[in-house]
Amino acid sequence: NFMLTQPHSVSGSPGKTIVISCTRSSGSIASNYVQWFQQRPGSSPTSVIYDDDRRPSGIPDRFSGSIDSSSNSASLTISGLKAEDEADYYCQSYHNANWVFGGGTKLTVL
Amino acid sequence: QVTLRESGPALVKPKQTLTLSCTFSGFSLKTNAMCVAWIRQPPGKALEWLARIDWDDDTFYNISLRTRLTISKDTSKNQVVLIMSDMDPVDTATYYCVRGIYGTSWFLDSWGQGALVTVSS
C-alpha cells in the first residue's frame, strides 16, 4: 500500500495565498484522482476539491487543486485567505479499491 | 437534501463487538454509482477509511482491518451497518458514514455528524 504525506502545518495572513502539498510514496500520483477535504474544529469533513482539480458546488474559486508528476504530489492552493479557512485539510486518493488519507495539515490564518 | 446519521453505543469494552448503523435519506443505495463508506478519526488524529458498500452490493475493506470488519446494507430501511469485532482502546474514534457518488472517481460529497465510540473497560 502507499502513503500520502502532508506538512503538519502551514500558515498565512489574510488575503495571501498558501499551498498544501500531498506526496504519494509509491505509484504515480497521476494514476488515481486526489480529493481534498476541509475539517473545521468540531465539524465533519467536507470536500473542497475532487478529481484532482474540480470544485464541488458552493466551493469558492479561491480553492484550487493540481498534481505534479515530477514531485509525485498533489497540491491544494487557497488564495485570498480568509479567517474562515482556518481548519485541518486532508488529501485522499486510492489504489484499486483501497482508499488512503494523508495525515492532515493544520492551516492557521494569522 | 442528503443526510446521514450514525448511531450506536458510545462506550464498548475491549474484546467486544461494535455495531454501528448509518441511517440515510435523500438518496437510494439502489441507484447506480452510489456507495456508503465508513471512515473513522481517533481524537486529534487523521482520517482512516474502513469499509465501503456499493449500490450493487460489492463490499470493500481496509486491508489492515478486513478480518475484523463486516459492512452490509438494508435498502428498504435506507440503512448501512458496520460491525467491527475485537475492539481495542486504539479503536477509540469518531466514526463517520459518508455517501459517495462515482463519476470518474468516488466523490465523497455528504458526511454524517459522526459518532464517538470509546473503548474502555
Image: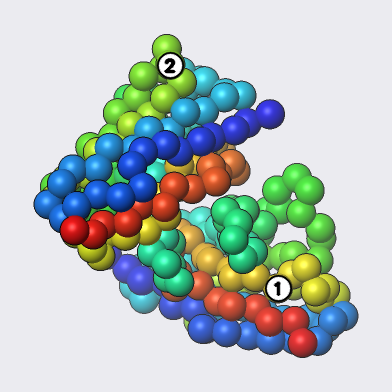
What is the CA distance from the residue labelled 1 to the residue labelled 2?
38 Å
Q: Which residue: 45% across, 38% down? A: B6
On screen, residue B44 versus residue A86, left or right, reads left
* Quadrant of the rendered image containing residue B119: bottom left
- Indicate the position of residue A101 as horizontal and vertical percent values: 43, 63
In contact (CB < 8 Å): disc 1 and disc 2: no
The residue lying toward the viewer, choosing from B119 and A57, is B119
Hey, what amino acid is under mark 1?
Answer: Glu
Around disc 2, counting alpha carbons within 10 Å, would you say few (fewer than 14), some (14 to 19), or many (20 or more)?
A: few
Pointer 1 chain: A
Q: Which mark is residue B20?
A: none
Q: Is residue A64 visible?
A: yes
- Residue shown at 32% from the left, 56% from the top: B118
Farthest residue in the front direction?
B121
Quarter of the image with the N terminus of chain B is top right
Q: Which residue is mark 2?
A: B77
User: In front here: A101 or B83?
Assistant: B83
Question: Where, by quadrant of the figure, is residue B121 drawn?
Answer: bottom left
Q: Position of residue A88 (x, y in %)?
A: 59, 70
Crowdedness near tag 1: few (<14), some (14–19) or many (≥20) residues, C-alpha within 10 Å? some
For image coordinates 80% across by 74% down, the residue present is A83
Q: Amino acid at mark 2?
A: Lys
Q: Residue B67 vs residue A81: left or right?
A: left
Dot 2 falls on a residue whose secondary structure is loop
The image shows residue A49 at horizontal and vertical percentages of 64, 57
Residue A11, position in %: x, y? 69, 86
Chain that bears disc 2: B
Residue shown at 18% from the left, 43% from the top: B17
Tally of numbered tags: 2
Q: Which residue is mark 1?
A: A86
